[in-house]
Amino acid sequence: MDIEELKDHISTYAVRIIEERGIKTLFPPQVEAVKAGLFTRKNMVIAIPTASGKTLLAELAMVREIIEGGKCLYVVPLRALAMEKYEEFRKWEKIGAKVGMSIGDYESRDEWLSENDIVVTTSEKADSLMRNRAGWLKDVTCLVVDEVHLLDSAKRGATLEILMAKMRKVCNPRIIALSATIPNADEIAAWLDAVCVKSDWRPVPLFEGIFFNGRLEFYADGVLTEQRKIGKDIMALVLDCLEQGGQVLVFDSTRRNAESTALKLAQRVFRYIDSNEDIAKAVLEENEGEMSQRLADCIRMGTAFHHAGLLNSQRTAVEKAFREGRVKVVVATPTLAAGVNLPARRVIIKSYHRFGGYASEPIKTIEYKQMVGRAGRPGLDERGEAVVIVRSNRSREEVLNRYIFGEVERITSKLGAENHLRFHTLALSSDFRSIDALENFFESTFFFHQNEISARYELERILLQLERWEMLEFGENSISVTELGDMVSRLYIDPLTGFMFYSELSKRDEFTEIAALHLICRTPDMENLYIKKSDDWVEEEAIAFMDELTYAPSPYSADYDWFLAEVKTAMCLHEWINESDEDEICEKYGIAPGDLMRVVETAEWLAYALSKIAAFINHAQKSFFSGLVKRIKYGVKEELLDLVEIKGIGRARARKLYTAGIRNRRELVENRQKAAVVIGKRVAEKAIAQIENDLKRGG
Ligand SMILES: Nc1ncnc2c1ncn2[C@@H]1O[C@H](COP(=O)(O)OP(=O)(O)OP(=O)(O)O)[C@@H](O)[C@H]1O
């Protein structure tokens, strides 16, 4: 089907914009979707493979919606993806569509988005917008859910599910749900009263293979198509592809392995690149610690590793260099496979096992499919190749049966877990003010659709717990949310976190820094650092402040290791807010810069919630808690707060200024020359201009 044929649905202008991208005809699954009712008001579930053109289908449906005067909400799982899609959709501004994005903090309503025709957001942010009663959400007429198979995700699936169910109650939009190929797409479609479009078609044919004992074998459509000997190890597999002008994406099981594989491959890959010195310099800009040095070394020789320990700027630099062909091989950990769109001619799965909490276990088939789905760049490669490396005949059989010929797992609802239920029940109680109405709502969820059980028993238990925590009150047949409950819900924290903050603050007037940080680390919303075998020092150092903490179990209790992980994280944050050097913190705690940033971001959000609850109960130290939020954000002692909030003055420069006797904004303006000597002329001038500007605006 020619794109031209779509002009009656989306206008000639819109057709031109698509053609400008070099798209002339629709891919077969896209034709199917159009025929199945893409331009009608039908709800649709579209389950087709990676890179087969789902985004274009969503865009076509959204453009049609806008022409009809509607408003679209496009929901993605990750912030990074939201930014990617936002940039992609801005091309529609050429036909007058207003495109916006909402990914900021969880308490704001982003009312300025009411004018926008397309708003890109994450499921968590959309859910929090609902809780904060953002008025413009009622105007949404089309909801696009990208990666709807993530309903199955233990961490985020429940929020996505509640969002979809709630949107249907609030504004009943048309729903377009985009999914990877899954066996029960029909079940999701039945839940949504939607038509289902399914296809296995791929724009670039996929050859799935196994590498065992130096022999490479490929299968396509279930048939063995090729076998050859190519050498002993992963190096041979990589060079085999580079020789033919391709690029390689390797998945390794752990960060450490990913790094060492990238370093090892670099020894031969360097022959295939020109100088990458500028990229190496860019990844060292924000951080020069050991991990960053290793990354820069790899990049100079044409490889890179990609895992959650990298800073965001480093990850972006690696992705860009790979897309531009300047880095030939990227070695990534499997957790990132879902989020990053980095196609390569050959995908190599070095190990299909991953540590699953207790032991090493095989990855799920859907994860395998997501990884191999990255093989083959549309328009650049004639075929995509995915190879799993195995070390025994048994593993070879397992890969064949489980992955190459195996079927992806069914998607199941994750709403039944207690923490998800209490988190969402509190928020829902203010919308549906009786148990009957709440129960009725839960009956419209995918959880209920799949399980067909009465939600009542679970629901009543959760409601009573929330009543005990003083977040809900019951009347004859009604539920009302208390002021505390409402605040906790809007702060977007687990009610258990809210209860812990509220009860500990009510019990005592004095918190030291470490006690407050440990309280934050005790909550279920915090992701603590791991305790390793070599971490005996944590316990030894903690003895000095154990008495200050709000809780300390006996060393013989089952919770003790968990407690030590909380203490370790609190100590790490304590060093951060007392200005220890970032690289030294990373080394001491055995973490990468990206981990430190994640701990800091989560702690800042929780400290903010803590400060709000402290203000709510008029706690004696309420200003200490609000200062703590900023100290965590910037990683400084109290005395630097005035300086560090100036753009371009990080923690290191602020400390230099302070040591030189410049202790605040006023003193900075009064000591221009001295400041220029201490932090450099350009930075000082910029900072002073900013302060003067702020003063002018303020006055
Ligand atoms: N009909 C078409 N003709 C040519 N190229 C197309 C067509 N439809 C989409 N593409 C291009 O194919 C590439 C992959 O498409 P897209 O990103 O929409 O896939 P997707 O199914 O959304 O992938 P993912 O599963 O990663 O989200 C994009 O570069 C897109 O511009």
Image: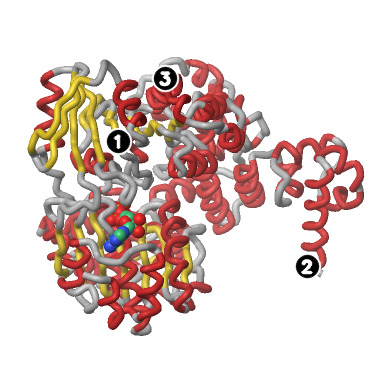
Residue labelled with disc 2:
698
The residue lying at 28 percent from left, 83 percent from top is 8
Q: Amino acid at mark 2?
A: Gly
Are the residues at dot 2 and dot 3 in contact (C-beta closer than 8 Å)? no
Measured Cα–Cα span from mark 3 to mark 1: 18 Å
Q: Which of the 4 quarters of the picture holds residue 532? A: top left
Residue 207: x and y, percent?
19, 38
Measured Cα–Cα span from mark 2 to mark 1: 57 Å
Circle 1 residues within 10 Å: few <14, some 14–19, many ≥20 = many
Residue ranking furthest to the front: 244
Say whether disc 3 or disc 1 marks the residue closer to the N-terminus.
3
Secondary structure beneath label 1: strand
Query: Is 35 above or below relative to 207?
Result: below
Discs 3/1, front: 1
Say whether disc 2 or disc 1 marks the residue closer to the N-terminus.
1
Determine if residue 374 is in view.
yes
Left or right of residue 402, residue 361 in this image: right
Secondary structure beneath label 2: helix
Of residue 126 and residue 394, the one placed in the foreground of this image is 394
Q: Amino acid at mark 3?
A: Lys
Q: How many marks?
A: 3
Q: Is mark 3 within 8 Å of ligand 1?
A: no
Of residue 75 and residue 628, the one placed in the foreground of this image is 75
Determine if residue 461 is in view.
no
Residue labelled with disc 1:
346
Query: Is 186 above or below relative to 219?
Result: below
Query: Is 71 above or below relative to 627?
Result: below
Q: Amino acid at mark 1?
A: Arg
Q: Which of the 4 quarters of the picture holds residue 292? A: top right
The N terminus - image quarter = bottom left
The residue lying at 83 percent from left, 35 percent from top is 659
